[in-house]
Image (cartoon, rainbow, N blue to C red):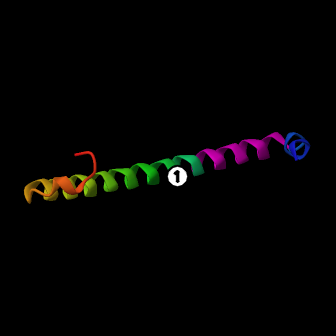
Amino acid sequence: MLDALTSAPPILLVLALLAAFAVAVIALRIAIKLAVRVGIVAAVVLAALYAVGQLELLPGV
């Protein structure tokens, strides 16, 4: 497997590295967006629980 990669023409290796980098960047952007949305939902839920006085439903609070 490694021999097949190292014996490829340099342009193909560069293209493969660019494709891997692009996939990693896109995955990171999606992960950040998802984490922000989950954080916003968690903040809203905690604020709602605090507003109605139900924080004792959460263990350790």
Count of numbered labels shown in the rendering: 1
Please state the horizontal and vertical placement of residue 58, each as a whole percent of the image: 25, 53
Would you name the residue on which mark 1 appears? Answer: 27
Judged left or right of residue 19, residue 59 is left
Residue 8 drawn at (x, y percent) = 87, 45
Q: Residue at x 27, y 45 (%)?
A: 60
Query: Is 10 part of what is drawn in magenta?
Result: yes
| Residue under the point 89% across and 46% down | 4
Closer to the camera in the image, 14 or 51: 51
Residue 54 forms part of the magenta stretch? no
Q: Position of residue 20 (x, y in %)?
A: 65, 47
User: Which residue is painted at 32% across and 56% down in the image?
Assistant: 37
- Residue 19: give x, y in percent of width and height: 65, 50
**Residue positioned 22% across, 46% down in the render:** 61
Above or below for 41 versus 32: below
Q: Quadrant of residue 2?
A: top right
Q: Nearer the viewer, residue 3 or 41?
A: 41
Residue 7 left/right relative to 53 = right
Amino acid carrying label 1: it is Ala
Q: Of 33 and 41, which appears nearest the observer?
A: 41
Q: Specify the segment rendered in magenta.
A: 9-22
